Amino acid sequence: MWNLSRFVASNLRQTRRFSAAIPGPCIVHKRGTDILHDPWFNKDTGFPLTERDRLGLRGLLPPRVISFEQQHARFNIFRSKHGRSDAIVLLFEILVESYRSLEKNTSGEPENVVSLAKWRILNRLHDRNETLYYRVLIDHIKDFAPIIYTPTVGLVCQNYGGLFRRPRGMYFSAKDKGEMMSMIYNWPSQQVDMIVLTDGSRILGLGDLGVQGIGIPIGKLDMYVAAAGINPQRILPVMLDVGTNNQKLLEDHLYLGIRQPRLEGEEYLSIVDEFMEAVFTRWPKAIVQFEDFQMKWAFETLQRYRKRFCMFNDDIQGTAGVALAGLLGAVRAQGRPLNDFVKQKIVVVGAGSAGIGVLSTAIHAVSRMMGNNETAARHQFWLLDKNGLITKERKDIDPAAAPFATSPGDIEGLTEGSSLVEVVKKVKPHVLLGLSGVGGIFNEEVLRAMRESDSTRPAIFAMSNPTKNAECTAADAFKYAGENIVFASGSPFENVDLGNGKVGHVNQANNMYLFPGIGLGTLLSGAHYISDGMLQAASECLASYMTDEEVQNGILYPSIASIRHITTEVGAAVVRAAVAEELAEGHGDVGPRELIHMSKEETAEYVARSMWFPIYSPLVHEK
Ligand SMILES: NC(=O)C1=CN([C@@H]2O[C@H](COP(=O)(O)OP(=O)(O)OC[C@H]3O[C@@H](n4cnc5c(N)ncnc54)[C@H](O)[C@@H]3O)[C@@H](O)[C@H]2O)C=CC1
Ligand SMILES: CC(=O)C(=O)O
Ligand SMILES: [Mg+2]
């Protein structure tokens, strides 16, 4: 049986890297079992003898301290036996008594059950030893992102009551009004860099999950650690529990949130205001990412706080940047110059925070290319919601959607409320992009209609999460819309075997390619707010990341295995944009003057150097 602690030692990089984002060696004030039970400090049997002596650990651990060399050799033998890509097997054999027992226990079980079992194993590791957890996550991000992030994180939120063991993050509820300024000091970490905040009102495409939505900030921040190298002691997932309108949860006696309908209007805003004031009083340099708020509050809070605090809304702004990069990739995939973006006809399905965010960013980009002609740019886009095509004739039109409504008579035969299939047949779009949250609405008829697209290589983006909420599966897209399409989904699908050795490439169009770099770049620039220019730089960086050859093979986004590299590049682009706009105030020892003098390469090196990497820091001063 492979031993966990050996894996710990073997898997630790021996070169110590300290970043601008973290202080020097961490010195712990706890002793004995308190350290072993603290996942921030626990090293399992990796504690050297000096630390065992001075921290009261002698006798509390098996006597052998595992040396790096021994472990590294063992690890390599193990790896060559299983192959690196088989990371799930590897981890399970290492972390639990036997992967086979997991397989046996779950054989014939639905995929959900197996995914949750995997999540539990990872979560247990997290609760025991964070350093090892993040190392495992970084080394095997491709295998584990679908467990800690979409799609499994959605299941975790849905089953949160039953899965809850130890709290992660902080909870501020409507009942804490007037208390938040003191509550924020209950968080044990002196410094917090990155906060992800939700009110649980629109969790992925799963709707209002109330307090159970905390899984999303946790998953997003795990990605921050893995992709952006934010020190896990400086992250804070937050749930703002203002009630829930989910009747099932309100009636569930095991529900862990406050049992009341959601606060509305000024009452709601006063809670968010109080939270923001408390956070920025204690940590003036923190960045707050708003995540999975229902549309009305997503837009309202973005407008309310954007210039006052360092914050952004990932669903509106992060998603828009990722989608724009994909849309530009889709132009290149047709073998056309980027300027041809202005000629692309794009149908967006879903007029929520994500859909509107994408639309408005894409229209701005087209408008810039057309010499700032926003009116003309709008003619290339069609927007649908649950009531079909949105036209200027729509009664009670949502103010957020109004600027994007189609003029009546724009295309013959299309009227207010035209169905998706009608729109696709008449418009013959180059791109069909779904952010509706409704699984399967790109059905066979809709996908077959995309065969008549005016594009030589139509693009289908089924961006809703989690997997069962995707507008179509990858297999259906290639089957019905044709093998020549470019395909992207919000949650991962396997590449599609098209026969004859051909493969339909599946891209993951997910804001995970941008939010870590936006957060990290903003942090290191020291900008006090996140400008449009910084967001645009992030998107352009992602768009230009892929080579022509890759794009022509239908590959629009990098593999998630290289997420740390792409995040470095995005982070550097954000820093440089902040510098160019004179927003950069610097971070730690690196002031604005130094940032100004950094070349593009030097900025990327600085960003890479600033990333935290999981190693065991000394817990006692050298004598
Ligand atoms: N891939 C990614 O990076 C991201 C994906 N998303 C996903 O996008 C989805 C939507 O998110 P939000 O815009 O925040 O939600 P939202 O609730 O604000 O908006 C949903 C929109 O879809 C429309 N809709 C509902 N049923 C429809 C139907 N049958 N046909 C056409 N439109 C329909 C609604 O009218 C509404 O306009 C979620 O599933 C979410 O997970 C969101 C952000 C990022
Ligand atoms: C990916 C994401 O942010 C969402 O589905 O809401
Ligand atoms: Mg989201």
Image: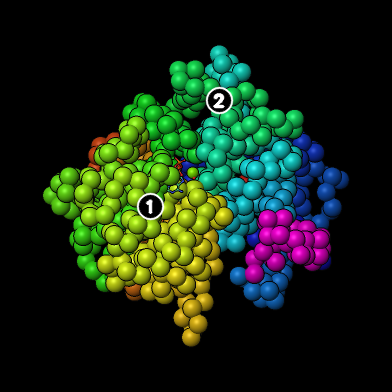
Whether the magenta-drawn stretch holds residue 94 is answered as yes
Is any part of residue 367 visible from this angle?
no
**Figure quadrant of the N terminus:** bottom right
Q: Which quarter of the frame holds ligand 1? A: top left
x, y (%) of residue 49? 76, 49
Which amino acid type is marked by label 2?
A: Arg
Q: Amino acid at mark 1?
A: Ser
In the rendered image, the residue lying farthest to the front is 413
Residue 297 at x, y = what percent? 44, 30
Q: Which residue is tagged 1?
A: 419
Q: CA distance from mark 1 to mark 2?
A: 33 Å
Query: Would you place residue 175 above or below residue 113 in this image?
Result: above
Pointers 1 and 2 in contact (CB under 8 A)? no
Element at label 2: loop
Q: Tell me what residue is drawn at x 75 percent, y 61 percent.
A: 109
Q: Which residue corresponds to the image point at 49% horizontal and 78% vertical from the top-left?
A: 498
List the residue tagged with mark 2.
Answer: 262
| Crowdedness near tag 2: few (<14), some (14–19) or many (≥20) residues, C-alpha within 10 Å | some
Q: Is residue 583 left or right of residue 514?
A: left
Residue range corresponding to the magenta coloring: 86-115
- Tell me residue 551's x, y (percent): 35, 69
Q: Is residue 82 above or below residue 432?
A: below
